[in-house]
Amino acid sequence: DPVFTVLGIETSCDDTGVAVVRSDGVILGEALASQYKIHEQWGGVVPGLARDAHASVIDSMVEEALKKAGMASVAEVGAVGVTVGPGLEICLRVGTETAKALATTFHKPFVAVHHLEAHCLMARFGQPLDSREPKEEATGTSASSPIPPQARFPFLALLVSGGHCMLLECWGVGRYRTLGGTLDDALGEAYDKAARLLKIGTGAAGGPAMERLAREGDPTAVVLPVPMRGKKNLNFSYAGLKNAFRMAVTRLKEALNLGEEEDFDPKTKADLAASFQHVAIQHLEERLTLAMKESESRGVHTLAVVGGVASNQAIRARLQVLCEKRSLARRLEKEQERIWDEASSENKGGGTMEVEAPLPHWELVVPPPRLCTDNGVMVAWAAIEKLRLGYSDVVEGRDVHARWP
Ligand code: KG4
Ligand code: ZN
């Protein structure tokens, strides 16, 4: 498995990301242009403006990533990968046309990347091809190993971003089973809308602003309904929580005699943010508990959290506890079963003692925060995973897919 390099390009939404990544998971050069300032005043991503912004910076982003990697041109990379969907069609086309032209000009293999697959595969960033020989177990805390723990197939992925909220079982590159999705809003979207109500941030800056503010607040101060309580399926719903939050904000303003444009005192604001986040995560925990029970029957015991919202530290911490709880519960269930089996085999007279392999623990894998949100590295990495299995795509006739299951 010789080491090679890939140039990855991402333009599916409002970030122009380009990176040169080596197949062993070393980022050689990276460039990222956020359009935050452009869309801020509109309260959402304006596709036409986004396309123009991508188009105006794409060439300089490619140049910057190559330069940081110490490369003079695309002639020095091994292949070109690009997000071809899903996303905003006219934005996807900027990156895709650029990548197609570069691959053609420099006679490089071309890989068409699925944006959501790229998010999921970041849980494996740096994972060697032969998963039986993992890189030395990294703890993420030891200074000697900068590489965070990497997921091996199969793993359960919670994909939470501004546009998506899904549970997937990942069995291999290109082999995914959707367990659940959102019935309405995505989690990142709910965070962003809650932030707007509190006037603490617009667009995708809302999520991080909510997380920061929530740290100062009391998560039990405002009672909000946990979505889909008692429903035994693996879907998400955040519209109800969003509306309940809006009503809570309105009610509190009335109770405090605040005008429409008046702001809460800092403490109340923090309490609101903390309460929102508390319930938002509780919904994740409840769906995940069900999904983990289902997936572990198929031999899955790794949970990966990916997508922009996975950069949230409160979510990481709570899901770490969830993994520990589930591991413990599962061991107790097994122990109970064993006691029953023993009792029933004794009644039948005799029975053999089998030595069982220890139960694997649920392991949580979350990519480093800056690699959770959209970037060029994840596209390059997804292309690397495909290329080392022998997959690549033809440039001719390749178009983008705004929608792509
Ligand atoms: O993956 P991403 O960069 O773009 C999409 O594909 O959607 O995700 C962006 C989303 C935004 O909704 C943003 O508010 C959210 O991820 N996000 C966060 C945090 N960081 C980013 N949400 C909560 N807490 C965070 N720390
Ligand atoms: Zn994304």
Image (cartoon, grey):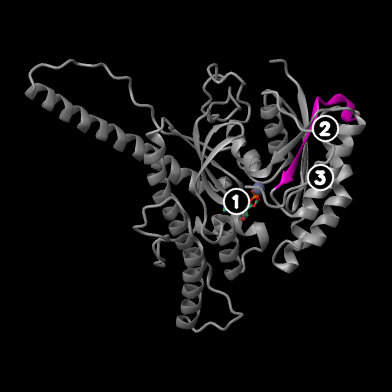
Q: Is residue 64 magenta?
A: no
The x and y percentages for residue 374 are 68, 46
Image point 37% across, 34% down: which residue? 297
Q: Amino acid at mark 2?
A: Lys
**Is 178 on the left-hand or right-hand side of 4?**
left
Task: Find numbered disc 2 in the image and state the secondary structure of the residue it sits on.
Answer: helix
Q: Is mark 1 within 8 Å of ligand 1?
A: yes
Question: Which residue, given by chain and number where applicable, does mark 2 sit on?
Answer: 68
As drawn, 66 above or below 237? above
Q: Amino acid at mark 3?
A: Gly
Mark 1, mark 2: which one is toward the viewer?
Answer: 1
Closer to the camera in the image, 79 or 136? 79
Label 2, label 3: how many angstroms apart (C-alpha)?
Answer: 20 Å
Q: Amino acid at mark 1?
A: Ser
Closer to the camera in the image, 231 or 246? 231
Question: Which residue, given by chain and number where applicable, does mark 1 sit on?
Answer: 161
Q: Which residues are magenta?
A: 73-85
Q: Are discs 1 and 2 less than 8 Å apart at CB?
A: no
